[in-house]
Each structure stands twice: as structure tokens, then as C-alpha cells.
């Protein structure tokens, strides 16, 4: 068992502003949870508090039901993998992986067995004698993972472990880390600001903004049922269109739409970039830019004066004029002031 519970967690570095502002979260045993949010929203601070490297201002952190607020980092049975692998440069790969076990005074033979096991699992067997500087970025990252898993920790904390790798390697390591999670059956708390990583890796995604949880849900729910404008805009490519609603009716570029239960006045209609050419209502627009990305095209245009983007198949005509086909069923609506979602019922 290794659940992690955050109760009314608060962190302030200067006793004025809370950078972590009353976070409540229950992370289940064996769960792969991804914390995602823009730079400065407090992701690393949360990990550092769970690990014990950072003091908490108020609230509680429980691991396996036990409050760990006053437990030394060394005794929390947690492994931390950082963005900058932080390997010991003068030590071999073998010694880097073995280091934590040596510090904990394991017997030599046991250390040797464990290091070799881990090296095998991470495909590092042929590199054990090398120094970190003789390795590629991906290999270094695997050593950092090896050093973390060799101790069989209860909980893994990973802070943007792939952000130093090039795009291809990142995709490859993504699935390697998922495989590792399946094999180890341990709780993973993974920080990224990459939405693709969040969607592909997480059992659950926690979207943070300004030290607060905006939504904690499955990738499917985060993508398809965002609770507010922030979540809708952060994950995926969402277009926000200002519309004026009256008696459940509104217009986009002169085309009328109808939707039950809309409040009168200015609201924000939203629709994903990949849902712009599959609906039943046609709107003609003039593309400002058309970009080719290999598998599809990205078309930029304005609706009701708002910048919009459509992702369209290569064989879909997008020249001087461009026919959008949108459906009310693919639209979301947000309160202009609060950003909260307005209803999920289909029209
Ligand atoms: N030691 C510190 N002293 C004062 N303020 C800090 C300290 N560490 C972090 N902060 C502030 O706390 C906030 C949260 O920082 P944190 O590092 O947790 O963000 P993050 O979500 O990990 O961002 P990034 O994606 O850039 O890594 C930021 O405003 C940051 O400036
Ligand atoms: Mg960070």
C-alpha cells in the first residue's frame, strides 16, 4: 500500500502569497498521477513538499494513512527523479545506481544483484562502467530512473524527467516509464507541462493553476468534460468564441444556433480545433494562414472577431474561402466572468 493524501495543503515562501493554496488530493495506491500546469503554478513545490525537501506552511501530507509532516525525507521511502538527472559525474553508471543502497549499508552482494537487475530492466547492462558524460541524454535519464527504482520506494516522484530529451526520445521514454510503472506497481506522481505526456501517461490528471487544483480527473474526462475555461484551454486546442445569447439563441458569423438553458448575455462558446469540419452547420470564412503539418493542415481564421484554429484533413478544401462545418453538439459554453462551464446537456 502506498497512497498519498494531501489535506488542505498550503505553501507560502514569503508569508504573503500562497503559491500552493489549499490543495486537497487523494492519490491511490499504484496510481499514475500527472500534475500539469503552466510554469510557476506550483508543481515542483508540491513534489518537494511530498518528498520532505520543502517544509509545508500548513495542512497535512499522509503516506499510507500516516501523517509525514515531521518525518525526515530520508525516512519517507520516496524516490525523486529530477529534470536535470543529477547523476554523480565522477561515478560510473554502476556506482550511481548503487549509491543509495551503499548509503543505506546494504551488503555488497545484495547491492550487486539489485544493480544488475535494474540495469537489465532499463537496458543499461553494457554501460555500467561508463561515466555519465559518456552517455546520451536518454541513457542518462535511464540511469536516473535506475537509481530511483533500485531502492523499491513506496512512491516515485518525477519532476519533468523528459524535458531535456529531444522529441523522438521523449516519446520513447514516455512508454518506457509507463511500462516501468506497470511492472513496479508503485504509486507514481509525475510532473509535466506537456499536455500530450499528461494525456498519454496519466491514470488521472491534476490540472493546476496559480496553486489551486482546477480539475482532477481521468484523461478522458479532462479532455471531454472540462470543468472550466482554464482546463478546456490548457488541454488540447480549443477555440473560444464570444457570443451573445438571447432566449437560448446565438449567432456565429451570422449563422444561428440554438441551445437550451443558456443564460442571456455575453458567454463564451468553445469548440475544439479538430471538430471544425465535421458538423451540420456551414459557415464560410476567409483563412488568414494555412499551415501544412504533414498529416493535416492547420487553418487560422476569425469567428465573431475571435482568433480560431481548425485542424483539417489534407483532402479538405481550404483555399481562398473555407467552409467550416460545426455542430452545436461539439460546443462547450463558459461563463464569461467566472470561466465555469455552463451545463453539459446536449442541445
Ligand atoms: N525557494 C523559493 N522561494 C521563493 N519562491 C519560490 C521558491 N521556489 C518556488 N517559488 C515560487 O513558487 C511558485 C511555484 O514554483 P514551482 O517551482 O513550484 O512552479 P512549477 O509549477 O514547478 O513551475 P515550472 O513549470 O516552471 O517548473 C513560483 O511563483 C515560484 O517563483
Ligand atoms: Mg517545476
Image (spheres, grey):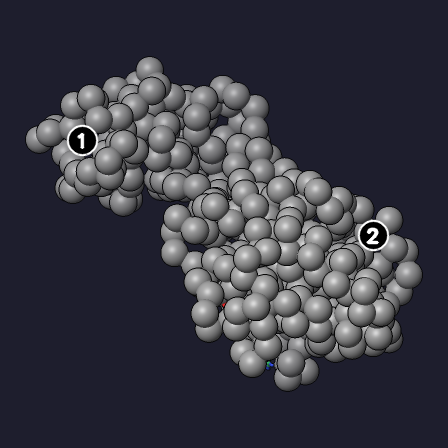
Identify which residue is drawn at 62% across, 42% down. Answer: 179
Q: Secondary structure at mark 2?
A: loop
| Image position of 4 with respect to 133: above or below | above
Identify which residue is drawn at 57% across, 33% down. Answer: 220
| Image position of 273 with respect to 169: above or below | above
Q: Tell which residue pokes out farthest to the bottom in this image.
A: 14
> Is residue 217 in view?
no
The quadrant in which residue 313 appears is top left
Identify which residue is drawn at 63% across, 38% down. Answer: 218
The quadrant in which residue 111 appears is bottom right
Question: Disc 1 vs disc 2: which is toward the camera?
Answer: 2
Q: Which mark is residue 2?
A: 2
Mark 2 is surrounded, within 10 Å at the Cα level, by few (under 14), some (14 to 19) or many (20 or more) other residues, namely many
Q: Measured from the top left, where is residue 309 in percent x and y?
A: 29, 39
From the viewer's perspective, tell me whether residue 321 is left or right of residue 279: left
From the viewer's perspective, tell me whether residue 298 is left or right of residue 344: left
Mark 1 is surrounded, within 10 Å at the Cα level, by few (under 14), some (14 to 19) or many (20 or more) other residues, namely some
Q: Earlier in the sequence, mark 1 or mark 2?
A: 2
Q: How many numbered badges does the structure rendering display? A: 2
Q: Nearer the viewer, residue 147 or 106?
A: 106
Q: Measured from the top left, where is residue 53 in percent x and y?
A: 71, 76
From the viewer's perspective, tell me whether residue 189 is left or right of residue 66: left
Q: Which mark is residue 317?
A: none
State how far apart marks 1 and 2 are (Cα): 54 Å
Q: Tell which residue pokes out farthest to the right in this image.
A: 66
Q: Measured from the top left, where is residue 80 in percent x and y?
A: 67, 65
From the viewer's perspective, tell me whether residue 170 is left or right of residue 324: right
The quadrant in which residue 22 appears is bottom right
Identify which residue is drawn at 82% across, 74% down. Answer: 104
> Is residue 75 in view?
yes
Q: Nearer the viewer, residue 256 or 294?
A: 294
Report which residue position mark 1 lands on: 285
Amino acid at each position: 500500500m502506498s497512497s498519498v493524501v494531501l489535506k488542505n495543503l498550503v505553501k507560502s515562501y514569503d508569508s504573503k502569497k500562497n503559491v500552493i493554496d489549499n490543495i486537497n488530493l487523494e492519490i491511490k495506491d499504484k496510481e499514475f498521477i500527472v500534475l500539469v500546469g503552466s510554469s510557476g503554478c506550483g508543481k515542483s513545490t508540491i513534489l518537494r513538499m511530498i518528498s520532505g525537501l520543502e517544509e509545508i506552511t500548513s495542512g497535512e501530507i499522509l503516506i499510507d494513512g500516516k501523517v509525514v509532516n515531521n518525518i525526515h525525507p530520508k525516512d519517507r521511502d520516496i524516490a525523486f527523479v529530477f529534470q536535470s538527472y543529477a547523476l554523480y559525474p565522477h561515478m560510473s553508471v554502476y556506482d550511481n545506481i548503487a549509491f543509495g543502497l551503499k548509503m543505506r549499508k546494504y551488503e555488497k552482494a545484495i547491492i550487486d544483484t539489485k544493480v544488475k537487475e535494474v540495469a537489465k530492466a532499463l537496458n543499461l547492462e553494457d554501460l555500467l562502467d561508463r561515466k555519465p558524460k559518456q552517455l546520451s541524454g536518454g541513457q542518462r535519464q535511464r540511469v536516473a530512473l535506475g537509481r530511483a527504482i533500485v531502492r523499491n520506494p513506496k512512491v516515485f516522484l518525477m519532476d519533468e524527467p523528459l524535458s531535456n530529451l529531444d522529441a523522438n526520445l521523449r516519446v520513447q521514454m514516455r512508454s518506457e516509464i509507463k511500462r516501468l510503472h506497470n511492472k513496479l506497481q508503485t504509486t507514481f506522481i509525475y510532473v509535466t507541462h506537456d499536455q500530450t505526456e499528461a494525456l498519454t501517461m496519466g491514470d488521472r490528471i491534476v490540472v493546476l493553476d496559480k496553486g489551486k487544483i482546477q480539475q482532477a480527473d481521468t484523461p478522458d474526462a479532462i479532455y471531454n468534460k472540462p470543468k472550466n475555461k482554464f482546463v478546456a484551454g490548457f488541454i488540447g486546442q480549443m477555440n473560444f468564441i464570444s457570443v451573445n445569447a438571447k432566449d437560448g439563441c446565438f449567432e456565429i458569423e451570422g449563422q444561428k444556433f440554438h441551445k437550451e438553458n443558456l443564460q442571456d448575455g455575453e458567454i463564451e462558446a468553445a469548440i475544439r480545433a479538430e471538430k471544425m469540419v465535421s458538423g451540420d452547420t456551414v459557415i464560410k470564412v476567409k483563412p488568414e494562414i494555412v499551415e501544412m503539418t504533414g498529416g493535416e493542415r492547420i487553418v487560422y481564421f476569425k469567428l465573431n472577431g475571435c482568433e480560431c484554429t481548425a485542424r483539417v484533413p489534407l483532402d479538405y478544401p481550404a483555399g481562398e474561402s473555407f467552409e467550416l462545418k460545426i455542430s452545436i453538439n461539439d460546443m462547450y459554453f463558459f461563463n464569461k466572468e467566472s470561466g465555469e462551464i455552463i451545463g453539459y446537456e446536449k442541445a
